[in-house]
Every structure is written in structure tokens, then in C-alpha cells.
Image (cartoon, rainbow, N blue to C red):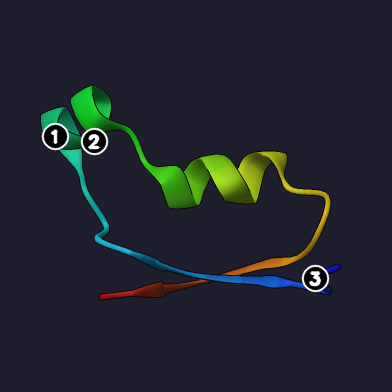
Amino acid sequence: NADALVVLTNARKGLNHLIKGSISENLANHSRRPVMTFKL
């Protein structure tokens, strides 16, 4: 069992974010554990 999640993000914006979405954002919004994100 993990106590927290650490994920890297590409920091997509605009149309690219709209089309491809963000796995990091999805994890942060739906995880029951704390999530730390770091920009690549």
C-alpha cells in the first residue's frame, strides 16, 4: 500500500491538453492518497 504518489507532468496546455488530457491531473483529482506532481 502506498502512502503517497509522486508523478511527473509535461505541463501540457491549450488544445494539446484538451485532446490528450493529463494522467497526472486525473490521478490528482481521483486518488485517495496525497499526490505530488513535478514539472519535467
Which residue is drawn at the image coordinates 37% and 42% (left, top)? 22
Give the distance between the C-alpha atoms of the residues marked 2 and 1, in whole angstroms.
4 Å
Tell which residue pokes out farthest to the top in this image.
19
Indicate left or right for 13 with 21 as reference.
left
Which residue is drawn at the image coordinates 53% and 40% (left, top)? 26
- Crowd band around label 3 with a 10 angstrom C-alpha radius: few (<14), some (14–19), many (20+): few
- Crowd band around label 2 with a 10 angstrom C-alpha radius: few (<14), some (14–19), many (20+): few
Which residue is drawn at the image coordinates 46% and 52% (left, top)? 24
Give the distance between the C-alpha atoms of the residues marked 2 and 3, in whole angstroms.
28 Å
Residue 14, located in which quarter of the rendered image? top left
Q: Position of residue 23 (x, y in %)?
A: 43, 44
Tag 3 secondary structure: loop
Give the distance between the C-alpha atoms of the residues marked 1 and 3, in whole angstroms.
31 Å
Q: Tell me the tag on residue 2.
A: 3
Q: Tell me the tag on residue 17.
A: 2
| Residue to which mark 1 is pinned | 16
Which residue is drawn at the image coordinates 83% and 74% (left, top)? 3
Tag 1 secondary structure: helix
Tag 2 secondary structure: helix
Callout 1 amino acid: Asn
- Crowd band around label 1 with a 10 angstrom C-alpha radius: few (<14), some (14–19), many (20+): few
Tell which residue pokes out farthest to the front in this image.
1
Is 5 rendered above or below residue 16? below
Tags 2 and 1 in contact by the CB under 8 Å rule? yes
Q: Quadrant of the C terminus?
A: bottom left
Is 2 rendered above or below residue 16? below
Q: Position of residue 2 (x, y in %)?
A: 80, 70
Earlier residue among tags 2 and 3: 3
